Structures are given as C-alpha cells and as structure tokens.
Amino acid sequence: MKFVVCIKQVPAVSELPWDPQTGTLMRDLAEGMMNPACKHALEAAIQLKETLGGHITAITMGPPAAEEILHEAIAMGADKGVLLTDLRMAGGDTLVTSHTLGMAIAKVCPDFDLILCGCHTSDSETAQVGPQLAVELDVPSVAYVEHLKVLGTTLTMRRLADNFLETLEMDLPGLVTMTTKHYQPRYVSLGDLNDAFLAAEILILNADDLGLDPERIGIKGSATRIQNVYAPQAQKENVVLKGAVKHIVEELFARFGDRIAGAIGKDLDGRQ
Amino acid sequence: MDDSKNKGTATHSIWVFGDYRNYFQNRVTLQLLSRANELAKKINAEVCATVFGHDVDEYVGEYIAHGAQKIYVLDDRKIKDYNVDIYAGLMVRLIEQHKPEIVLVGATSFGREFAPQVAKKLLTGLTADCVGLDINDKGILLQTAPAFGGNLLAEIITPERRPQMATVRPGVYREIPHNYHATGEIVRLSLPKDLPKPRVRLLSAERQTQREQRLEDARIIVCGGRGMGSFKRFRNLTELARLMSGEVGATRPVVYAKWASQDALVGQAGRQIKPQLLFSFGISGAIQHTAAITGTDLIIAVNKNPNAAMMKLSDVAIVADANQTCLALIKELKKSLRG
C-alpha cells in the first residue's frame, strides 16, 4: 500500500505538560517539534506498513527548517520526505493550504491508497486542512480516527464523535485524520536520527515545481483575512482576601454570600 | 415577539446548519439561531435553518420556536444516518441555489468535519471554533477565534467570497427562549435523483455515557489546577462541587496527570465555560485556560501566589492554600446550606 502522511512542524508549546513524577516541565517538547497528532498519524501508517507492506511518503510545508521533522519521520519509518517550501506559500488559510498539499500529493504520489493527517495541530487547531485536502483530491475522508484496519480496498475505523463511539467503513483511496489516542509514536534513538540525517531521501519543492498559480496560494490566495489580533482580557473587581483560612471563608460569605447563594439557588442560612 | 419582521423585505439570509444528533449538538444549533437573529438585524437578513435526516419534524418545530424564519428540510430514510460526505454534498447544492450571505455551523465533532468540506467545495473561507461573531461597519461578518495556540484572539473576515462561514464553539451564546407562537416557512425538499453512493458508511454507533450536565451548561464550576497538590486532594473539589450542585473542571496539567478526565478540561483545547460562579483552586492562569472562562460572572480564585495571573483576573483573590480553603468552604457550606 502507498501511504502519504502529512506532518507539520509546530513551535514550542507555551503550556508545556509537566512530569507528575518529578514535577518538572517536559522541556524536550519545546523548540520546533513534529505536531503530536501528526506523529501519531505517522505511527499508524508505520504500523499498517509493517503488516501490509508498502511505502510511506511524509510531506510537510513550512520554512526550510521544517526539513528536520522529515528526518525524524524517516528515522521512525517513513521511506521518503517531501518539503514544500516557498515564501509565496506562507500565511495561507486552510483553503489554500489544502490546495497546495493536494497539488504536491498529485505530483509526488498520485497513486496513493491512504493519506493520514493529524486531527489538528497544536499551534492553530483549526482541524480543517485534513477534510479540505480530501475534497481537493476528491477522495472520502473520516476525521478524529482513533484506530484503523485495512480490509482489502476498504478501511475500517473506530472513533468517538459527539459522544458516539462509531465504527465506520471507507472506500480506498481515502484520507483519515488521527487523534492521539491509540498510536503511541515509537522512540527514535539518536543513532537512528543521525542515520536519517545522513541518508535520508528528501525532495524539496517550491511553487514553480508544483505548477502552482501564485494567485491561489499563500496570503494572496486565501479566502480569509486576519484583521486584528489581541490578548483576551476580563475586567474584574479583584478583592483580595488573606489571613487565616477560617476568617477568609467567613469574610467571603459575608461579602459575597448573596451572589454565591444566588448561583446555588438556595439560601445560605443566617448569612445575610 | 414579531418573528415576521424581515419577511419579504430581507435582502440577505443567514443560515444555521441544524445539528441535532445529541442534546448538546441541538443546543448549539439553538444558540446559533439566537446569535443569527441578532446579526440579522444589522444586515437586514432572514434567519434560515437546514435540517437533514429522517423524522426530523421535531427539530423543524423547535428551530422555528427558537428564531428560524425559514427552514429547508430534507427528510428521507436514505439520509437517516449522519454522513459527512452526503450531508456536505447536499448542503453545497442548497447554498449554491440560495446563496446565503453567512453560514454558521456548531463546532461539534460533526460540524468541525462537515463545515471544512462544505467551505472547500464552495471555495470560500471558514473560521474554526469561533468564540465571537459580529457584523462590522461594512456589513461583513467579524469572526473572533483563538489564534497561536490560544494565546491570542484573532478577528478574521472573509472579505470577498461568499458565503462567509464559521464554526462556533458551544456555550458561547445563549439560546432565546422557546416561543410557541412563532411561525416560519417550511420548505420541504426531496433528495436529488443523482445522490451519490456513500463512500463512508456507518457500521455502528454506540451512545457513550455522558456526565450529567455539561460544563458549558453548568451554573457553578469548581475548577482545579496543579496547586491542589495531589489526586487525593483534587477529589475534595468534587465534594465542594456536589454541595453546590456544580461541576468540576480541570486545567491541562491536571488532566495530563490523570487527576481528572479529558472531558473536564477547561481551556482552549477543551471546554469554554461561562458559569455564574467559578471557584478556581491552585490555578496559575495560563492563557489557554483563562481565555476559556471569560464569560464567567463571579470568579473566586484561591492561590498561595498572589501574583498568579488567575488571581489578577478574579473578582475575589484568596491568598491561601488551595486545599485548606476548599476544606474550609466544604465545612462552611455544610453548616449553612439548607433546603
């Protein structure tokens, strides 16, 4: 089977998970990294390839530095990496990003059986590129897949959607977007990573290589425009209470008992 | 309430996709109908809903009672199962035929898979997971959505292409009360003859047990962070919430440490909440979390660190140990609650 995995490099996350054992932040997740859901999608593809045989093309779009995650993908088990990099592609919305990716897949792996994407990225979380890429390539798709199995020319999938645990079947070729629930990405040793950097097969393409119309890519081709960006703020009373806990609680009920009781919908005995 | 005010004179239409498969999907549809009515006044538009499925009259009536002036209904056994592929195709045909100015879809699992396909087929813009919708001075839909990992909010527009599309997070708007006297036009359509064979087929769907009330709907939420110190102490929050008939929410580190389940996550990747009363225990106030609580009426934050961002955002900032304060509150409420 021919697999294409779309992966994205995401920036250092601002709210890093912490290790409950040591109480420290898991800083190895910082810097540029492969988006977690993309990595799970790649792991799913590798596991399918291990049982069914086949070939995995990992594809990413981004600045030249995004090549790093293609090496990581190859160290994990992908056969080939494709980097789409071009300033003209930058800043695009999901409509044009899915167009660019679709054109690239049509060029480098037109006879794909299954495309796997992460269900969303940690930096933008739109979750739109996967389903839109399927439309671009006119193949069926299923989002938020937890587990999948190939049976001949159909794919059987399990997912949780709107509180229904669903089993679905899809004709191939098709596209899935994967959650981080089931396919825990394998560990890659430094040695393997090093080998992947030395021997990797990476194809680098720009908009001209893909025959892209500059009017249909990047910011220029996008349907949406970002007008303004701001930090959310809330204006609050900010009464500070401190001292002994017992007194704090008494004062809280004395001053805010009405509003607390109002929210609860019951009287607070002898407090008002 | 005059629900016929725009009839005949409306120059535009705002559409809401009728997502109804479970109670909460239906609620966000009602919330969007409410907001669509407010937006419609600013651009002289008619509010329409679409309902696809089989035996859906219950929803047709409900959407009219909640502000839809016109409903396009596709009621057929062949489309009784929710199917993104088929529904997206049907929606695209309807949109191409009637050319609404704006199309709103709830940011449910279904909506977030369905809307991108519809937008792509129409080659128009779509903003994901909006937390605010308005109309700007040019009559264009102003879509506010979290950006850059939730650190910031972005105002996004679709200046030229139509329709302008957005998925909107559940719980951002409140539905308007049920109006039994409302009337609306019901347009019953039949399935196109060339309905494609489904390329994705639903083999089984099993309804999962759900918490009794969703965080989005809770009037009181007790939210805990890493500052609670341990799983055992975190469970005291459940006791406090229970006393007030509230719900427990959690921050990402707490969910990561498995003190609370994923569906308790309050934050950019989880729930957007707007309770009347929020107790916040041992939460530092990372922006992914605080961006999701902005609609709260009264915030009482407890933290040893008076400079924590969460303390600055609160109505009442209690400088104390989170767990001890929680226990003292439990004691006090047990004494004073009656009825």
Image: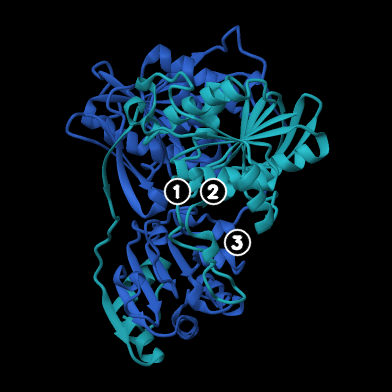
Along the line of sight, the residue nearer the viewer: B116 or B73: B116
Choose the circle earlier in sequence order: 2 or 1.
2
**Are discs 2 and 1 less than 8 Å apart at CB?**
yes
Q: Where is residue A97 in the image (x, y as percent from the top left)?
A: 45, 31
Residue A123's disc is 1
Q: Report the side of B262 relative to A155 (left or right).
A: left
Q: Quadrant of residue B122?
A: top left
Q: Mark 3 points at which residue?
A: B261
Q: Name the residue under label 2.
A: A35
Residue A57 against residue B233 in the figure, above or below = above
**Where the N terminus of chain A falls, by quadrant?**
top right
Along the line of sight, the residue nearer the viewer: A168 or B69: A168
Amino acid type, label 3: Ser
Residue A187 against residue B311 in the figure, above or below = above
Q: Which residue lies furthest to the top in this view?
A: B193
Q: Report the side of B107 relative to B297 (left or right).
A: right
- Give the SS element for disc 1: loop
In the rendered image of this protein, which colour is used for chain B?
blue
Q: Where is residue B166 in the image (x, y as percent from the top left)?
A: 39, 34
Amino acid type, label 1: Asp
Q: How far apart are marks 1 and 3 (CA)?
A: 23 Å
- Give the SS element for disc 2: loop
Work out whether disc 2 and disc 1 sit on a shared chain.
Answer: yes
Chain letter of the cyan region = A
